[in-house]
Amino acid sequence: FRRVLFRSRARALLGAAWHALRLEVDARKQQPKDVTAALADFDRGRAEGRDVQALLDDLERDLGLEGESDSEEDGLEPPVLTGVVEMLVTEFRWEQEAGMGYGPALTEAAQASLEHLSRFGAAFEQPEELDGEALRRLLFFWAPEQRLPAEDARALVEALDAFVPWAEAEHDLELASTWKQVRSGVTELERVLAMNAELPTVLDTGGELFEVLEAEDPLGLPGLLVSEEGGVPARLVPHPEAFRAAQPGDLLRARRTDAGLEVFTAYPATARVG
C-alpha cells in the first residue's frame, strides 16, 4: 500500500510542478517558491541521500500544495503537456532511486543518458507518442544526427532496458515487443556512430538519403555502390574518408559532388522499419 501511495503522490506532485512551470506566477493563488528552484532542491536532496518521503513533503510545501489531497482522484492527476517524456523520465528516476524500479540499479552513466530520451521527446504531447517506433527513431536516426558517442548509446540502451518494462507496466505504453527488435541492432549502431564521429558537430540537414548497395572493394574500383530512392546506382567515393568503411544496407544522408559523395550523416540499416 505504501508503495502505491508513494507512486500516486510522486506522480501528482510532479504533474503539479510541471503544470506550474507553464503558468504565470500571478495566476496561482500560492507560490511560495519558484518551481524550478523547488525541483532543483528536490534533486539536490536526492543526490545527498536524504529521505525521499521527507523530500516529497518539502516539495509539496514549496509548491504551495500543503493541505491538498494526495489522491490522484482528487484533482492532482498530471495534465497532458509538452514535456510529458521528461515527466516520465523523472518519475522513473525517482522510483529507481527509491528501490522500486525494474531490474538492477542503473549505472551513473545510464542514469545520465536518460537526458537524451527527454531531449528526443521534448515536443511529445501524449505519453502514447513514446511507442516502439519512437525508440527506433531515437536510436537509429536521432542518435546519429546528434553525434552521440558510442559509449553514450551503450549507456542509453542500458537505461532503456530498465525503462521499457517500467513504462509498459506502470503506464501501459506498448514498447516491449518493438524494443526487443530495436535492441538487436545496437551493434550496428555503434559502428555507424563511430563513423559519424568524423563529421562536424553542427548538423547539416541537406542532402538526400542514399542506400549502400555494395561496400568498397580494396582490390577493385574505389568508392561505394550507392543509390538514392528511384535513382541509378553509382559507385562514388565518400567524404570524409571514414565512410569508405560503410557496409551494405547502411543509409547515408549525402549529396553528389564532383569529388564523389559528401556525407552528412550515416544511419544503420536497422533504421528502416521492418
Image (cartoon, helix red, strand yellow):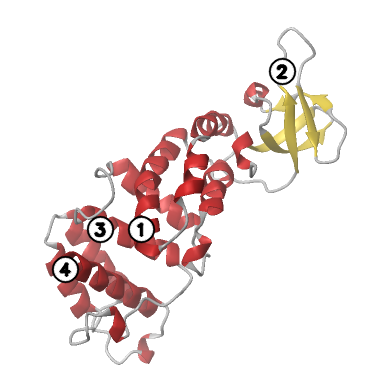
Q: At label 3, which amino acid type do we have?
A: Glu
Between the C-alphas of marks 4 and 1, the distance is 17 Å
Q: Is residue 13 above or below residue 270?
A: below
Secondary structure beneath label 4: loop
Between the C-alphas of marks 2 and 4, the distance is 62 Å
Task: Give the image location of residue 38, x and y in percent.
Answer: 25, 71
- Which residue corresponds to mark 2? 216
- Which residue corresponds to mark 3? 95
Image quarter of the C terminus: top right
**Residue situated in front as seen by the camera: 152 or 73:** 73
Residue found at x 37% / y 90%: 26
First reached walking from the N terminus: tag 1 or tag 3: 3
First reached walking from the N terminus: tag 3 or tag 4: 4
Q: Are marks 4 and 1 in contact (CB under 8 Å)?
A: no
- Which residue corresponds to mark 4? 1
Judge the density around disc 1: few (<14), some (14-19), many (≥20) Cα neighbours within 10 Å.
Answer: few
- Which residue corresponds to mark 1? 169
Q: Is residue 271 above or below residue 67?
A: above
Q: At label 1, which amino acid type do we have?
A: Ala
First reached walking from the N terminus: tag 3 or tag 2: 3
Secondary structure beneath label 1: helix
Query: Image check: 84 left or right of 256?
Result: left
Judge the density around disc 3: few (<14), some (14-19), many (≥20) Cα neighbours within 10 Å.
Answer: some
Q: At label 4, which amino acid type do we have?
A: Phe
